[in-house]
Each structure stands twice: as C-alpha cells, then as structure tokens.
Amino acid sequence: MKGDTMMTKTAAVMIADGCEEVEALSPIDVIRRLGGKADMVGLDKLKITSAHQVTLTCDKVLDDSLLDYDIVIFPGGTTGAKNLRDNDQLMKLMQKRAQQSKWNAAMCAAPTAFSRYGLLDKTHYTVFPGMEGQIQAEAKDATHTDNIVEIDKDAHILTSRGPATAFAYSYAIAETLGYDTTNLREAMQYNYLIDNIQ
C-alpha cells in the first residue's frame, strides 16, 4: 500500500561526510517506495562523500525545517556519526524535536550522537557492538539491548546495529510512520532472506 488513505509522511535522512551509504540510502529507498517523502539532508553541503568514497547529492542542506519532518534519521559510519555528533546546530534542532515528542532514529555508530544530545536518557536503545560503553557513560539510566532494531515508543526513539540491519531498520521506520510494509518486504525478497539465511 502506498499510503493512499493517509497523509504523506515525511522523513529526513541526515547525511555527513563519512556516512555509511547503505544505512543512509536504505530508509530513503523504502520510504519513497511506499509513497512517503524522504529528503537527503546534507549536514553542511549538498555533495557528501561517504565512508567508501561514494558521492551523494543531497536534496537540501540542514536548516530549521528539520523540525517539520515526521522523523529524522541518522545513518552511522564512524566518521559520519562523529560529524553529526559534533554539530551544535544539529544538536539544538534534535533537542527541540525531542521536546516536541517527534520521532528520531539512529543506527550503527549514530546513537552516540543521540547520547551527546541527551536524547537517550532513560531510553532503551541498541548500537553497533562495542559502542554501548560510550553511550552508557553519557546517557542517564539508558538500557542497552541486543535487538536488531530497538523501538522506544515513550521516547520516540528508534535505533539499530549496523549495515546488515539497514533494511530491518528501514521497514521499522516506515511502520512507525504508519505504512504497511507487508507487500514491500515480499517484493524486495526480504522475507526470503529472513527465511533462508544460514
């Protein structure tokens, strides 16, 4: 279903130099296939160089319109996540989104940005293995899980673990926005993968 019976949902994927490209593009792909509006938002410019030297051309550059999206999504990549984490303009906007109870998502190394911003306090989250210590040192009363995707409905936070979990993460994001992913999972061979992976 392309969401014909509901208002089009909007997502912004924050893209910084050094991002993990599969984690950046999978949510864009899934949300657009379902009829949603998904924008690639460059942290500080339109053309971004990913962790593996792929040039990504964004739709826009970060500004206050980030507050208007139904969900904001952070891909990982060690350098990309650090660039997102260290940006004070982005931090202030994300803190405002959290105060407004808007959905935010981060995967791989990117939950470390959320911990710096204070978004993971008192939440359940997952992160790339080995990075939970950094988050536990920053986030007050946060609970780490080993789930592929962790959804904290009270905090409006969705997190995931790494590149191979990008589609599980993307489907969970779409479902959080209200889309039915049943047919898309089948069409994209995701169900086959889950049933047959060794």
Image (spheres, rainbow, N blue to C red):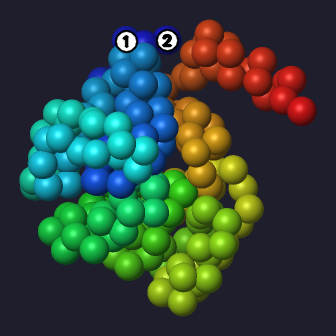
Image location (x, y in percent) of residue 66: 19, 51
Residue receiving disc 2: 1
Against 135, residue 18 (above or below) is: above
Q: Nearer the viewer, residue 39 or 175?
A: 39
Residue 55 sits above or below residue 105 on the image: above
- Residue 81, how many percent across, how many down? 39, 62
Q: Nearer the viewer, residue 90 or 51?
A: 51
Hey, which quadrant is residue 31 in on the image?
Answer: top left
Residue at the image position 35 percent from the left and 37 percent from the top: 54
The correct choice, above or below, for 36 with respect to 94 in the image is above
Which residue, given by chain and number where applicable, does mark 1 sit on? Answer: 4
- Say what secondary structure mark 1 lies in: loop
Residue 35 in percent (x, y) is at: 36, 17
Amino acid of disc 1: Asp
| Crowd tier of the residue under label 1, counting other residues whose Cα lies within 10 Å: few below 14, some 14–19, many 20 or above | few
Mark 1 and mark 2 residues within 8 Å of each other at the beta carbon: yes
